Image (cartoon, helix red, strand yellow):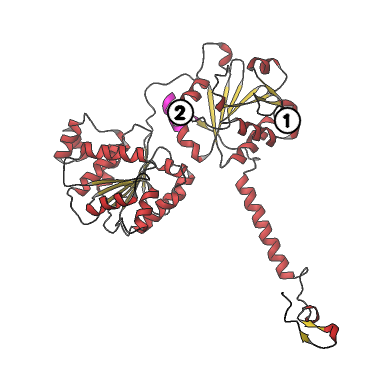
Amino acid sequence: MVLLEKLKLSKPLVRSMTDAGFLGPKDIQLKTMSRILGGQDLIAVAPEGSGKTTTYVLGTLMRLKYGFEEAPRALVLAPDKERVLAIIEQYQLLNKNQTIRIVGLYPEGGMESQMDALADGADIVVATPDRARAIYLKLGLNLNKIIMFIVDDAAEIVKRGMQLPVAELARSIVKSQRLVFTEVYHSKLKLLTDQFLNEPAIIEIGDLGEQKLETVDQILYNVPDFKTKVNLLNLLLEDEEVFDKVIVFVNTRLTAEKVFKSLFKYLDKDIAIYKPLFFDHPGFDLIEEFKASDTRILLVADDLKESIDLKSIPIVIHMEIPANVETFVGRILKSNLEHDTDRMGLNFATDIELSQVKKIEQAIGKPIAMAELPGNLVIEKDKLKKVKKHAEQSVSTASDIGAAFHPKKKSNAKDYNYSSKEKAKMKFKNR
């Protein structure tokens, strides 16, 4: 009854929810369900496990109500086959209306068999963007009757570079409600959603869990790209007094070598690599050797899969966010030792890495403070824009003046043989 009163669900859906073990509505469902049922475009930002999938499954089943239409009325896009199957399982769990047909499309198996399944009839299509687009272009997916277009785990879709098929499918639907569900909403995702959303409501759920872990102080720098990360690292490491002993974590040893070569030359004597790939680069095979040395900065790669003793290291920088949440959390937990209380953690993250940051925040039960980028930091993409603009202006100026280029004289055109004292055209010039 609680679900019926607060979410305004039909009685069959309430029974389905009860049978499935849902005792009450989640926060995201309370804040979004009325908007979904009202047909409004929506962006829902919430952490993993907050009930995003259940929310749009309930909304879809409420809006469709019956099946056996001539074409699908709901299209749900997900990043991979595993997610597609998990969504279909959730639909089957809550759908007691056997007339509503659900078909999954993903890049495995023959495309013809999936097209045949669509031809047999589908009310809800759950698909990966690339497979849905491919079948649509083969005229196997009819989008004329779509009334709900849903993008699930949108940040992961952007991370995998599937923005183009999502945008093309959205633009191919004449009129529908568009819903986007994601763990994090960043600038790259905004570029995608701006192409097809119409004045969406943005609902953000900040459920980071009940248990808060004791961690060292953390700061997050949101940077646009890897080269800007290098610029930021160079800028920070100029302060030898503050950054007197630093460990910088990256994902791979190849990245460590790349960062080593990209740092300012005057840092050569201050920086080393932990177990370097190349013998001619300065390095250490033991962390204790680094601690006892005069070297200020040590680059450490996560692909070594080693537990690093961070005791007595005052500053730890994650230049790349580890794929494993437990790895990161283990490094920032505050131990009982006094010298850990002053440790500082600095984290560099691009938009693509922000979803991993959200998982970390959920694991530790609190947000990581966002820091402003230094005013004198060189943003690489802005630098490239300036260079491009300057080049275009230079070309434009040169074309206007015409200083370096003049039209050829007719005598220099090489079309006539003047040496023979007659204007005989050179017919075989190009042979």
Magenta residue check for 360: yes
Image location (x, y in percent) of residue 54:
28, 37
Name which residue lies at 16% across and 44% down.
Answer: 98
* Residue 242 makes an appearance in the image: no
The magenta span reads 357-368
Name which residue lies at 62% across and 52% down.
Answer: 385
When asked about the image quadrant of residue 49, the answer is top left
Magenta residue check for 68: no
**Numbered marks: total:** 2
Quarter of the picture holding the C terminus: bottom right
Vertically, is 431 above or below 287?
below
As helix, strand or loop, the secondary structure at mark 2 comes to: helix
| Residue found at the far left of this picture | 11
- Disc 2 designates what residue? 360
Amino acid on which the number 1 mark rests in the picture: Leu
Position of 319 compared to 66: left or right? Answer: right
Image location (x, y in percent) of residue 408:
77, 76
Real-space CA distance between mark 1 and mark 2, rounded to the nearest whole angstrom: 32 Å
The crowding category of the residue bearing disc 2, from other C-alpha atoms within 10 Å (few below 14, some 14 to 19, many at least 20), is: many
When asked about the image quadrant of residue 294, the answer is top right
Amino acid on which the number 2 mark rests in the picture: Ile
- Disc 1 designates what residue? 267
Tag 1 near tag 2, CB within 8 Å:
no
| Residue found at the far bottom of this picture | 422
